[in-house]
Image (cartoon, helix red, strand yellow):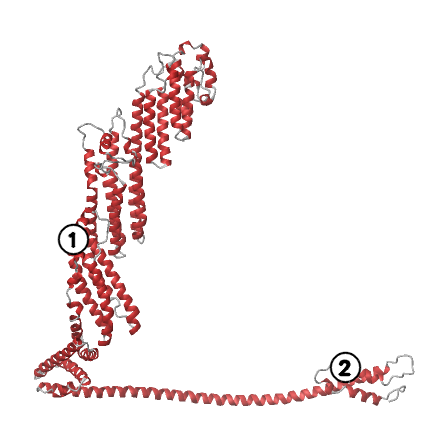
Amino acid sequence: MSKGKAPTNEQQVLAVKDVIKLDAFKGKMLAKDIIDNLSSKASETFDTSSKEFDPQPLIRIYDLSVDELLKLRKKVQNKIDDLEDAAQVTDNSRKAKFREFSKEFEEVQSAFETLEVGLGEVGNTAIRIGEQLEIIDKQISRATEAKSIIHSFMQFNVGQWGHLDDLRSSGYEGKYKVAIMLRRLLIVAKEIELHGTETAKMNIEKYSEDFEKSILEEFDAAYKNHNIEFMNQCAKILCDFNGGNSCVQMYINQHDFFIKDLKLYHPHESSPSRSETARGSSEKARGSQATDLGLIRLYAEILNVVKKEWEILSAVFPNAHSVLQQFLQRIFAQSIQSYLETQLSNAEAESFLLYLRKLAFSHSATSSLVNDLHRFDEETIFAQSETLALGSGIDRAFNDLFVPYTEGDRYIDVEHRSLFDRFDEALAPFFIGLSNRLKPKKDGKPMVSILKASGLNLLGDSQEDEGEKTPEELGLPSVELTIKLIEFHYESTRRCHELASAKELPNMSASLFRFFIEATGTRYVEASLNSIIEEVTMVDAKVEPDLHYIPLVKICFQILHLVQLHFQTCVLPTILISPVVHRECVLVKNEFIEMTETLVNSLIQKQIEASINWIVSLLGRQKKADFKPRDESYGANNTVTQVCGQCCDFVEKIHKIIVQSLDPENAKTVLLELGNSFHSLLLEHYKRYPVSQAGSLILAKDLSRYHEMFSSWGIDKLEERFDMLRELGNLFIVKPESLKTVINEGYLSQIATNLLLPYVSMRTDYGKFSKYERDLFQAPAIASTNSLNSLESTVY
């Protein structure tokens, strides 16, 4: 086609068909490529001579392309319709074939199920036939055996048993068959009750006895020759003949362990000697375990024998587990029981304590032996046979061994009796001392002189006299004796934990604890404190009180601490599993503590009252002229008055004892009460003695001495009180015209002036006071003191 000429319609159609064809849309088709190809075809027909663009060729090409595309789409759609029709026909055909195949499969399945049912019926029939055949076979076998047994029975009835003798002489297999035959004949002989069979029964029994005897003899010979293989054959024969118990008993009866002299396990050192008995009764020995060397050796031998014996038993007896059980039962029932009965009987004849100690040790040692045997059973026997040989049988043997000693209340009754004896023996010196203290003193001497004469030192100072008495010998509580009682109870509780069952333990432990509290609390601590309180109460006020009782407070609190600690560590673990018993024991313990604290408080109060009474007695020795000396220079040169010195010496003695005897908090409380009481006594005391100008210096020295003493105690409230008392002394020292200044300063400014009048009026120059000076102390109280009637209550 030449450029510049318009293409013909036929040429354009051919150009479009060359581009728009079915192959162009196969694979990866791009619309841009198709448009580019059409545009390229159209450009070939452009008129290049013309300067203007002519779109008509492109429009015609694209119009033709659209027409061609529509035709192509129609053609493709027709092809698709044809393919869909063909596919539908094919699918219908496939579905028809599938339905046909399904129907055939169902028929095959039905046929298979019918066949399976038929095979099942055939199988069941075969099983029934097999069972019937087995039954028939057994019946035939039994019939054959029955025939043989009847034949043998009839032969025994006529005294012929040669065929059995032939079997016996043919070796092990023959003897085994004879054993089976004789076992069955014995059964038949017992069941048949026909006239004329007595001879057969008698011959069968006699032959069986002879057969068993001969096998036992062979077993015995093999046993003595250590022929394990032949022993095993004999044991199997006898086991199938009658259980084999006869050869088991022969084996056990002839065992070296039961034949040798059991005195080997009763050494002299394990039997209770006189010295051991004395130690058990007098409690001089500290040990609480009656170690039995003979029992230890016996149990070591038993464990060693069992370990060795198992190897033999498992090789000899087909029922080795049962034989081992019988062997151990024999050991427990004969060897151990015999040994324990002898030892415990001898111990009981000596003392309850020795009996209980040996019983507890025997129980503990036997328990260890049982644990060792169980361990051997689990680690060795089970590993070899995959079966435990001992099981619970050995536990029953262990429990049966101690039933005669622990059944019911047998054990706890003996424990109570032993504890009672031990407590009585330990408390005997205390009871004697208490009785002596409660007796009226013929010489009229107070207890303090007796204590000093005896050398008793409750404050812990050194003592050199070897003949000095202990606190308990004087009827007084002591830590040492309490520790001894706690040791007794601890030993009993530990035995109780060993011997009592888990169910019985809380109640038994509680009963022992109640007994301990009764002895330690009521019979010992309470009785001692009551007697002391009674004695302190009866002390004559004109006699210096016995301060040696105050240290008992510290001892009593140490006793309470020991009891509390003992309860927590020893008693509590045994009663926790029973809330009721636990609550009861706590109440018993708390009642004891409260009772002791109440008595201790009463003792302290009585001692303070006795001390105050003695201070009152000392103050009563003050002379009227002590603060009104004749010599005016006496007051400047002299020290404190004799009464002040005596009071301070006595109060300082009390202070020392209280500080050493009580904890800081309680000591402070007691000293505060003592100081307050003493302060009150001094306030009243100085209302009764006239004071001169020279005597005021003596009084000031007394008050300074009191202030110095109480200030050294480090108790602020007491220091304040005696500061006020020292300032009160200034009322006697200053000149009358200076009194107003004194009463308006320091502690005195807080006191109503009319309350100071009793003191000021004791000045020897009070009669020379001016009206103004007297009015200072007659004026109404500055503070509200209508309800106060003393100087002390005004200030404090």
Label 1: element kind: loop
Q: Residue at x 36, y 35 (%)?
A: 666
Which residue is labeled 1 in the image? 273
Name which residue lies at 20% across and 39% down.
431
Quarter of the image where one finds residue 213: bottom left
- For disc 2, the marked residue is 33
Whole-percent x and y of residue 350?
15, 52
Which residue is at 70% across, 84% downward? 27
Mark 1, Cα crowd under 10 Å, few <14 / some 14-19 / many 20+, is: some
Please tell me the numbered disc located at residue 582: none
Along the viewing direction, whichever of 557 and 268 lies nearer the viewer = 268
Which quarter shows the N terminus? bottom right
**Residue 786 appearing in the image:** no
Q: Amino acid at mark 2?
A: Asp
- Above/below status of 440 relative to 625: below
Q: Is residue 149 left or right of residue 584?
A: left
For marks 2 and 1, give the CA distance: 128 Å
Q: Amino acid at mark 1?
A: Ser
In-image side of 114 versus 88 (left or right): left
Say if residue 452 shows up in the picture: yes
Which percent across, then down, holds residue 275? Answer: 17, 50
Judged left or right of residue 146, residue 113 is right
Callout in the foreground (2, 1): 1
Q: Quadrant of the C terminus?
A: top left
Q: Crowding at label 2, few (<14), some or many (≥20) Cα neighbours within 10 Å?
A: few
Mark with earlier residue (2, 1): 2
Residue 65 point in image, percent of width and height? 79, 84
Q: Position of residue 172 (x, y in %)?
A: 19, 84
Task: Provide the secondary structure element on which disc 2 rests.
Answer: helix
In this rendering, is residue 29 above or below 426? below
